[in-house]
Image: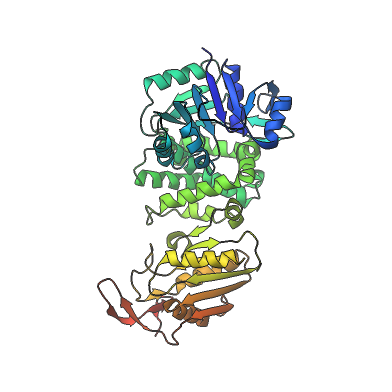
């Protein structure tokens, strides 16, 4: 039976999905916008299938918006992970019942909740991943796949029998390899554990994986192993079951190593990995930030190989995505968030700002946004009351500020300034006196000219038996 299908999103995966479902006899509509919509309407959907060595052209109905009353048997939402939440209210308001969210999605539960909360009608939501890579160029799609494998299922349980029958009907003549999964949230997070190390290495070699060394390929596997360990520690099942065996010693690891060699040394890696890293920078930054949010739930779990690879990810990736780079004591030696202006009026300069004895990192973030709005790159820094930092003002390590200043210099900033108020001004002056080679300027608002005695505000005001500050393990008198 022919089914009415909407593919919401006309990137590489959306276009390939439109092609195979149309070939399978379905009535397919593709939602696209801008020049790409004009191209599809003028010349049809042209796809060069790289491995199959063939080019196909399909006449596809194209629209540029989804109205509330438009009704389809299934809507496939095929968007980058950082963009999908923008369109979910539109999909939720539509009259169609069955929705499949396709692609990377670190926050499946949030997406499902948003659809249900914003929808006036009952909906069933599935999650899917389509094993296709590639790029768009010269008015066509270059696609790489081996039979278009599709993994699909519910977030935490199997789909209803009616939804399963519907999807079987949709894909029955498409040639896709359909796999059912009852725990797609865990599956998608396991996929993140595999692909992020590849992305980190891709950025380390300027998105040319042919230059990846044998130690880097090994590190990709070891980092993925650490990623799977984190997910298990957080209570997520490994999906597909047994996939962690590809990252431990034995025949499966050898097989995965051979696969990584092929990915790095053949055009497969360019089409399946590095093209995406180069052109979907906002999605990679979004996934990286989502992974760091997961890590904050287990801050004591070591991931040394992962951390060594992640340092290769340029901060510009975050800047271009609009996502602020975050730093944590466990991985970076300090707790902070970097705010970069759209137009940098002071190139080569960065300000590190922190607050006083309220200890609130949120206030530091607000201050940083003010400086950012005036064109100055600013790092909001916490020095107490966050993971890995003291919970009172006693022997607070100035080492964290040292680590922050060093990182800013490593990132290419030639001059580092400090801005602090009250207790933070005391810290700024102390740090500048101890770090003359790292700190170039200080703004001290309402400062003290001495190192004050430590104190705690947990139960009223308690004076501590020593200095507020320490440096390299020694008390600052």
Toward the viewer: 448 or 37? 37
| Residue at the image position 38 percent from the left and 64 percent from the top | 386
Residue drawn at 46 percent across, 25 percent down: 179
Give x and y (percent) for residue 300. 37, 57
Q: Position of residue 51 (x, y in %)?
A: 65, 27
Q: Residue at x 58, y 57 (%)?
A: 315
Report the residue that reaches farthest toward the left. Answer: 459
Q: Position of residue 285 (x, y in %)?
A: 55, 49
Query: In the displayed structure, would residue 3 be above or below residue 408?
Result: above
Front in this rendered view, residue 452 or 400? 452
Query: Is there any visible trace of residue 133 in the rendered image?
Result: no
In front of the other: 254 or 169: 169
Residue 56 lies, with reference to residue 198, above or below; the image says above
Instruction: Say which quarter of the image contains residue 342.
Output: bottom right
Q: Residue at x 60, y 63 (%)?
A: 411
Q: In the orientation shown, which residue stands out farthest toward the top?
A: 1
User: Residue 383's image quarter?
Assistant: bottom left
Residue 160 picture location, percent across and down: 37, 23
């Amino acid at each position: 039976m022919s089914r009415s299908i909407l593919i919401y999103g006309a990137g590489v995966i959306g276009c390939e999905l439109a092609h195979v479902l149309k070939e399978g006899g379905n009535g397919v509509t593709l939602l696209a916008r801008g020049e790409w919509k004009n191209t599809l309407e003028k010349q049809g959907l042209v796809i060069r299938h790289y491995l199959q060595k063939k080019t196909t052209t399909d006449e596809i109905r194209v629209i540029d918006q989804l109205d509330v009353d438009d009704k389809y048997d299934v809507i496939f939402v095929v968007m980058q992970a950082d963009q999908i939440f923008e369109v979910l209210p539109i999909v939720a308001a539509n009259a169609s019942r069955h929705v499949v969210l396709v692609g990377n999605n670190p926050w499946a539960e949030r997406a499902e909740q948003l659809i249900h909360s914003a929808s006036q009608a009952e909906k069933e939501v599935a999650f899917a991943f389509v094993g296709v890579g590639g790029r768009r160029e010269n008015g066509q799609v270059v696609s790489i796949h081996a039979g278009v494998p599709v993994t699909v299922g519910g977030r935490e349980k199997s789909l209803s029998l009616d939804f399963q029958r519907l999807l079987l009907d949709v894909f029955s003549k498409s040639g896709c390899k359909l796999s059912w999964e009852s725990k797609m949230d865990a599956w998608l997070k396991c996929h993140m554990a595999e692909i992020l190390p590849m992305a980190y290495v891709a950025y380390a070699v300027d998105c040319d994986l042919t230059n990846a060394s044998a130690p880097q390929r090994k590190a990709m596997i070891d980092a993925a192993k650490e990623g799977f360990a984190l997910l298990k520690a957080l209570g997520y099942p490994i999906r597909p079951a047994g996939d962690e065996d590809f990252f431990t010693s034995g025949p499966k690891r050898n097989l995965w190593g051979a696969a990584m060699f092929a990915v790095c040394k053949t055009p497969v890696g360019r089409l399946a990995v590095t093209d995406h890293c180069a052109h979907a920078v906002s999605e990679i930054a979004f996934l990286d930030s989502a992974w760091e949010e997961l890590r904050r739930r287990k801050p004591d779990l070591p991931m040394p190989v992962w951390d060594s690879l992640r340092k290769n990810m340029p901060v510009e990736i975050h800047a271009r995505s609009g996502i602020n780079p975050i730093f944590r004591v466990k991985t970076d030696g300090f707790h902070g968030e970097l705010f970069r202006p759209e137009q940098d009026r002071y190139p080569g300069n960065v300000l590190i700002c922190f607050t006083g004895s309220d200890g609130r990192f949120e206030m530091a973030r607000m201050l940083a946004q003010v400086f950012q709005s005036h064109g100055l790159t600013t790092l909001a820094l916490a020095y107490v009351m966050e993971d890995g930092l003291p919970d009172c003002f006693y022997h607070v390590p100035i080492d964290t500020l040292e680590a922050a200043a060093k990182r800013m210099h490593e990132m290419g900033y030639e001059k580092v300034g400090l801005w602090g108020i009250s207790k933070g001004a005391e810290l700024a002056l102390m740090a500048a006196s101890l770090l003359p080679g790292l700190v170039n300027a200080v703004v001290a608002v309402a400062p003290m000219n001495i190192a004050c005695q430590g104190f705690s505000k947990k139960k009223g005001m308690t004076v501590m038996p020593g200095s507020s500050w320490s440096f390299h393990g020694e008390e600052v008198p």
